[in-house]
Amino acid sequence: MAIRGFRGAIQLDQDEREHLLKSTAELLSKVLHANELANEDLISIMFTATPDITSEFPAVAARELGLGDVPLLCFVEMDVQHALSRVIRLMILAETEKPRSEIQHVYLRGATALRQDLAQ
């Protein structure tokens, strides 16, 4: 069994708590579903938020989805002048039999601009 990284990002319409939680849950659910990952496969999840997001920790959405036993950590993304605003990113580390070439990274809404080569 290999340990793989699964990436994703979503751009928020606004920095509002309920919108952040719903959007983060959507992103997380789509990454897990696209890669057929179950709770027991997960090692940890790291979230970043651009500095303009202050309404809530993205990890709260993961806890609300029942992932409270998975180590979760939030960071502030680098404040780069030309960066996309209001973006939540995640990196999931999980055990999987999938080869790296079959991993599905998920970029939603305006975040598709971050990695057009990977966006679905």
Image (cartoon, helix red, strand yellow):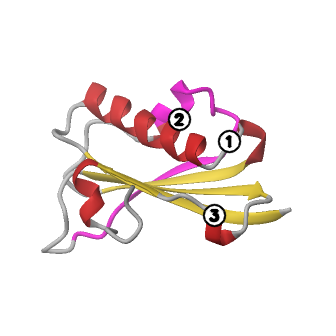
Instruction: Give the CA separation, mark 3 to mark 2.
Output: 24 Å
Q: Amino acid at mark 1?
A: Val
Question: Which of the 4 quarters of the picture holds residue 22?
Answer: top left
In the picture as drawn, the residue positioned furthest to the right comes out as: 1
Q: Reading the chain from its start, which is encountered first: label 3 or label 2?
A: 2
- Position of 96 with respect to 103 (left or right) is right
Instruction: Judge the density around disc 1: few (<14), some (14-19), many (≥20) Cα neighbours within 10 Å.
Output: some
> Is 63 a magenta residue?
yes
The residue that disc 1 covers is 70
* Residue range (magenta): 60-79
Question: Which of the 4 quarters of the picture holds residue 16?
Answer: top left
Query: Residues at badges 1 and 2 in contact (C-beta under 8 Å)?
Result: yes
The disc at residue 102 is: 3
Q: Amino acid at mark 2?
A: Ala
- Give x and y (percent) for residue 80: 20, 74
Which of discs 3 and 2 lies nearer the camera? The answer is 3
Image mark count:
3
Q: Secondary structure at mark 1?
A: loop
Q: Secondary structure at mark 3?
A: helix
The residue that disc 2 covers is 62
